[in-house]
Image (cartoon, grey):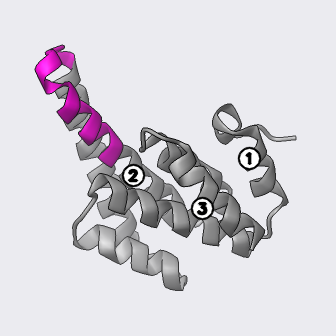
């Protein structure tokens, strides 16, 4: 059995994901990405376009994927730079940027042409929020329905 990073958060969810059809896996990924983008305030034209693509499917425009990957990298850089300052006063902003970076990263994995990256999208979406059950419950529902 192939182990996913998802197994480290929720072995049950990882197993449900393995057992689900590709269509249900994609649906669960859409649910997770939509939920966390909204929850962490990830916005922008590229985010809207990425979520629309996940809803409707089809071939992903390379430009869109590059924009999402660039957004995730920029947010990662921002939170890491701020975190390196080690100032407790900036901690809430570090966590906010970390959450946005994880949500953007989830979108990037979800848009990948490799369906094997969908579990990575779920992992990133779950770590984007403080309470993992906020994402796990609806994703479980999408995998089962």
- Of tags 3 and 2, the one toward the viewer is 3
Quadrant in which the C terminus is drawn: bottom right
Name the spot of residue 75 as percent of width and height, x first. 25, 43
* Vertical arrangement, residue 69 with respect to residue 88, above or below: below
Q: In which quarter of the image is residue 16?
A: bottom right
Q: Earlier in the sequence, mark 3 or mark 2?
A: 2
The residue nearer to you, when weighing 20 against 91, is 91
User: What is the spatial separation of the Cα atoms under label 3 and label 2, in whole angstroms?
Assistant: 16 Å
Q: Are marks 3 and 2 in contact (CB under 8 Å)?
A: no
Quadrant in which the N terminus is drawn: top right
Q: What element carries label 3?
A: helix
The residue identified by callout 2 is 103
Marker disc for residue 138:
3
Q: Which of marks 2 and 1 is nearer the N terminus?
A: 1
In magenta, the rendered stretch is: 84-100
The residue identified by callout 1 is 14
Name the spot of residue 130 as percent of width and height, x first. 42, 38
Residue 112 in view, yes or no: no
Q: Which of marks 3 and 1 is nearer the N terminus?
A: 1
Whether the magenta-drawn stretch holds residue 39 is answered as no
At a point 58% along the width and 67% down the height, the residue shown is 113
Residue 92 in the figure: left or right of residue 6:
left
The residue nearer to you, when weighing 51 against 88, is 88
Numbered disc total: 3
């Amino acid at each position: 059995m192939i182990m996913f990073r998802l197994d480290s958060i929720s072995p049950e969810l990882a197993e449900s994901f393995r057992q689900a059809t590709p269509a249900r896996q994609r649906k669960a990924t859409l649910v997770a990405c939509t939920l966390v983008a909204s929850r962490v305030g990830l916005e922008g034209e590229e985010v809207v376009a990425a979520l629309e693509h996940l809803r409707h499917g089809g071939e992903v425009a390379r430009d869109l994927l590059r924009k999402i990957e660039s957004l995730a990298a920029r947010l990662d850089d921002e939170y890491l730079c701020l975190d390196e300052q080690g100032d407790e006063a900036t901690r809430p902003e570090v966590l906010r940027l970390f959450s946005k970076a994880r949500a953007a990263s989830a979108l990037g994995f979800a848009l990948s042409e490799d369906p094997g990256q969908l579990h990575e999208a779920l992992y990133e979406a779950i770590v984007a929020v403080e309470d993992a059950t906020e994402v796990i419950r609806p994703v479980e529902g999408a995998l089962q329905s």
